[in-house]
Image (cartoon, grey):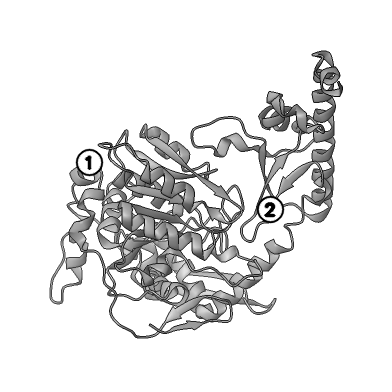
Amino acid sequence: MTKISEPNGIFHHQDGPSLKRLPDEFYNDFLSDIAKNRRPSPIRSLFPLEKTPGVISLLAGKPNSLTFPFTSLSFTAVSPTSSDETTLTIDGAELQLGLQYSATEGLEPLLDWLHGLQEVNHGRKRGEGWRISVGCGSQDLIYKAINAMVNPGDSVLVESPAYAGVIPMFVSLHCNQIEVETDAHGICSSSLRTTLEQWPAGKPKPKVLYTVPYGCNPTGMTATTDRRKEVLQLAREHNFIILEDDPYFYLYYGKAPRYPSYFQLELEEPEAGRVLRFDSLSKILSAGIRIGFATGPKALLNAIDQHTATSNLQVPSLTQIIVFRLLQSWGYDGFAAHVQRVSEFYREKRGMVKHLTGLAEWSSPEAGMFFWFKLLLAEDPTAASDPAHNDSEAVIRTRAFENGVLALPGTAFIPNGGRTPYVRAAFSLIGEEDVEKATQRLRETILQERAAVAARRVQNGIAVAAAA
């Protein structure tokens, strides 16, 4: 199979041998009891039949668009290749499409554009057993995917530290969260292998692995190609689905060429279909527009859509048509140029912890908008036995806040809780002057805590014993 490198390090493949995929019935064992018992919407399931030539539809209770007061919508957007602004107008049939109810999985023109985007970025073509559904942000789709695949009490594999927004989803299902170690190179495939090979006999193995492979929230780590390939191999050997949550895929600014996604790496697998991928437009177009999209096996996307059809019906058609109109005007080259500019913006902001040298340890992120750093709360290494030395919670929530800086203690990202000396700091919004102030205040906080640790050791007589 021939792969062609794009200037931004993204790959796609030319025509080659057809990709072998897992059959639809394979996913029956991966659906939760709720998903299996959920019935299709009696109205929305028939929407596709309205397109049948010659059919007069009396099906849906759609309001008549002649009663809508909106006649046109115009907005301006910055060009992806310059600072010029362009005015785009939505009217006529296009506006009517945006004002009306639409298909649960998304507007057809937007879906077509996104399918093309996945081919450009990941080399995946239609006809390989996958499709796309649009959601109200990727978090909406992740929540529905988890509910469609996980039963209460199930064991699930979760990288640790993990995105704090997904942990309550597993907790609400009373899941047994199996933490998989991570480091600066991403999820530790060796840790994952050990966990699975030592799994208790007779106990059902996890059906899903949750991971954020690019610019992980909170750690900022990006998984290397070798790690991803090993995880894919383990997914095949131990029969689980990879939930590839990738909202920072387009915020990559590392020096190395862009690593291929799990979704792309499936092209090299004996069979494709073990990756359910989640993309977000929140970080690159607008957080408030609330549009993300899931890509993966049709059977899993169908289960997600059935949930949507009985909850929020669909993503607002109007926001979908606005996004489509913008992306259509840019084209894939314009989109890539915009993404490059956004990633450069965040690359220039990632130097925020430079004043903490000697007081904290960290690895510089290659993507995303977060620093994950370990507080060195005791100057003397022998003080490691002091509980405060390994706990950022009280220091950040009390002393740091009192000093005028707010960050998030690392314990919020530990799936099963517990002490950690780590802290997450977001550098996406603050300017250079505030960065200077924030890091100076964090520096002062750590020095104050070091003094407090030293005082406690003296009080307990530990310092005298250590000196002897």
Q: Which residue is mark 1?
A: 33
Q: Quadrant of residue 51?
A: bottom left
Where 28 sits versus 47, above or below?
Answer: above
Q: Quadrant of the N terminus?
A: bottom left
Counting other residues with Cα less than 10 Å from the Cα at mark 1, is it few (<14), some (14-19), or many (20 or more)? some
Amino acid at dot 1: Asp
Q: Nearer the viewer, residue 453 or 214?
A: 453
The dot on residue 363 is: 2
Q: Nearer the viewer, residue 336 or 359?
A: 359
Which of the two discs, 2 and 1, sits closer to the camera? 2
Q: Quadrant of the C terminus?
A: top right
Q: Is residue 219 left or right of residue 266?
A: right
Q: CA distance from mark 2 to mark 1?
A: 42 Å
Compare marks 2 and 1 and give the one earlier in the sequence.
1
Indicate the position of residue 329 as horizontal and vertical percent values: 51, 79
Indicate the position of residue 231 as horizontal and vertical percent values: 42, 57
Image marks 2 and 1: residues in contact by CB distance under 8 Å: no
Of helix, strand and loop, which one carries label 1?
helix
Indicate the position of residue 423 as horizontal and vertical percent values: 67, 40
User: Residue at the location (38% across, 60% down)?
Assistant: 233
Q: Quadrant of residue 396?
A: top right
Q: Is residue 148 left or right of residue 165?
A: left
The dot on residue 131 is: none
User: Residue at the location (51% across, 65% down)?
Assistant: 225
